[in-house]
Image: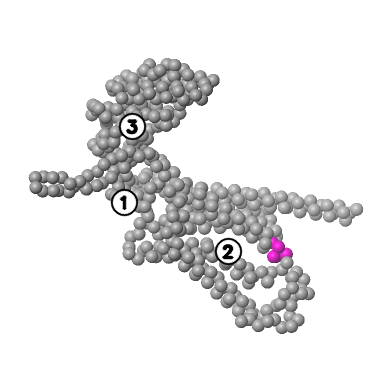
Amino acid sequence: MAQEPEEGHSTEGDEGYDGGPIKSFLEHLEDLRWALIKCASAVLVGVMVCLYAGNYVVKILMRPLEKAVISYPAENQVVTVMLGTNRLGIWQLGAEQQAAFNLNAAAAPQPFSVDDITDLKALVKRLNEKADGVSAFIAGRLDADAIAGLASASLSPTNSGRYQALLIIGIRRIVQGPSIYEKKRFEKIKLGEVTTALQKRNPQGADLIRLNRLLLEDAFPKELSPDAGRFVTLELQPITIESGTNHVQVMGWSAKTTPNPGHMDISLVVLSPSQAFLVGFRLALFAGLALASPFLFFFLGQFILPALRIHEKKYLYRGLAFAIPLFFSGVCFCYFILMPAALAASQLYANWFGFESTFWEAGEYIGFVSKFMLGMGVGFELPVVILVLVKIGLISYSTLKKARPYMIVINLVLGAVLTTPEVFTQVLMAVPLQILFEISLLIAWYWERQEKKRAAAADTTIDT
């Protein structure tokens, strides 16, 4: 252990210090050794805790993936294939595949409901104006009082609900009736691939109901919801077929329509026996460092603070008062806002290039998420670093102003290094960092202005 300082060997009379013993070089090394031992112990305990609670840490890191909002391109059905509780994959069918599988016939066609109207005001306006053949045809077969009532600006909520119910009943009657398709009636309407493929088959029964619904969705794409029956889950299950005295088991399936999930459905996988442990240890290391960080700051502070002068401690305390909240603000901003957008963009690019993006490698995902959040937290420390340098006189407002173009490039480079290698996510990270730099620039300008005012006031006092 370090020996006590010699008697009278203190800083009590030194300018700028708040008193306390002065230690020799070896004594400082001894203090550093104990500080490092305590930091290593805190990290080790944090890693062990996070290894034990690894499944909970994974759930926390999976949240941005579950909250990432995506939109499926085109209009074709999106099919999720399940075997028991295992998801085998998600596929978007082509027009010919959708017509061949005819999954909506397996699950009864869904009639229109109030929830299927996405823009009631626009729908009623088109029915009133009868600007095209479809609008005129539909309006002629609906309750005229309901359309006029919904178009009234002074309509009460009670009457609005009643008229809307009448409107839905009329639309259901049209969909469940004879085919509404006529070439002249739909000449101004662009029909989708699925609608055209089904129309060529001359459908009857449930398929005809489905066709009528698709025709209305194509005619009113902004007013009626196009997603009913589009998202289907196929559940594979063994079926026993009796053939004389033999019993043959084959794989059958049942289909059911599901609502648009609106978020990514990605599974994380490991590709080797040892990878699960290696990924788990890497995850525990990242989480353990985060868990032990308050203790690390405390132990390092015990070693560093006695060597600082009074005014240096003052600046350090002020800096920490802003640095810690800014760091956690950056991490939270990344976790709740940037990360879901970045993950959705990555799947969008994968679909654009034609790659399968149902399964992601667990280690790559955890490394990306951890690096992204840490980088965003460190990036939010930019104002503290800049303003401390301004306060101690190393840089000035004019220097910062000249550095603005370089900071734009630096922020874009940081966005490219710390996020997915595509422009959208890079800009998402660079924009808040640039905003923080502009705020720092504004504060530096204010400080310089106040300093000039104080200097001018001091000169005036001396002259008088």
Is residue 263 or residue 423 the one in the foreground?
Answer: 263
Callout 3: 10 Å neighbours few (<14), some, many (20+)? Answer: some
Evaluate whether residue 13 shows in this view. yes
Q: Which residue in the structure is indicated by mark 3? A: 110
Q: Which quadrant would residue 183 be assigned to in this image? A: top left
Mark 2 or 1, nearer chain start? 1
Q: Position of residue 136 (x, y in %)?
A: 38, 17
What residue is pinned by disc 1?
A: 86
Q: Is residue 240 left or right of residue 255?
A: left
Rendering quarter of residue 256: top left
Q: Position of residue 118 (x, y in %)?
A: 44, 30
Query: Can you tell which mark lies on residue 106?
Result: none
The secondary element bearing badge 3 is classed as loop
Disc 1 from disc 3: Cα separation: 27 Å
Q: What range of the chain is rendered magenta?
A: 311-315
Q: Is residue 98 visible?
A: no
Label 1 residue SS? strand
In terms of sequence position, does the residue under pointer 1 or pointer 3 come before the other? 1
Residue under pointer 2: 294
Q: Which is more foreground, mark 3 or mark 2?
A: 3
What residue is rendered at 84% in x and 54% in y? 459
Percent of width and height locating residue 277: 38, 65
Secondary structure of the residue carrying tag 2 is helix
Q: Is residue 220 above or below residue 366?
A: above
Total marks shown come to 3
Count residues near mark 1 (Cα–Cα under 10 Å), then give few for <14, some for 14-19, many for 20+: few
Q: Position of residue 321 (x, y in %)?
A: 65, 58
Task: Give the quadrant of the N terminus.
Answer: bottom right
Q: Does 155 appear in magenta?
A: no
CA gap between label 3 and label 2 equals 56 Å
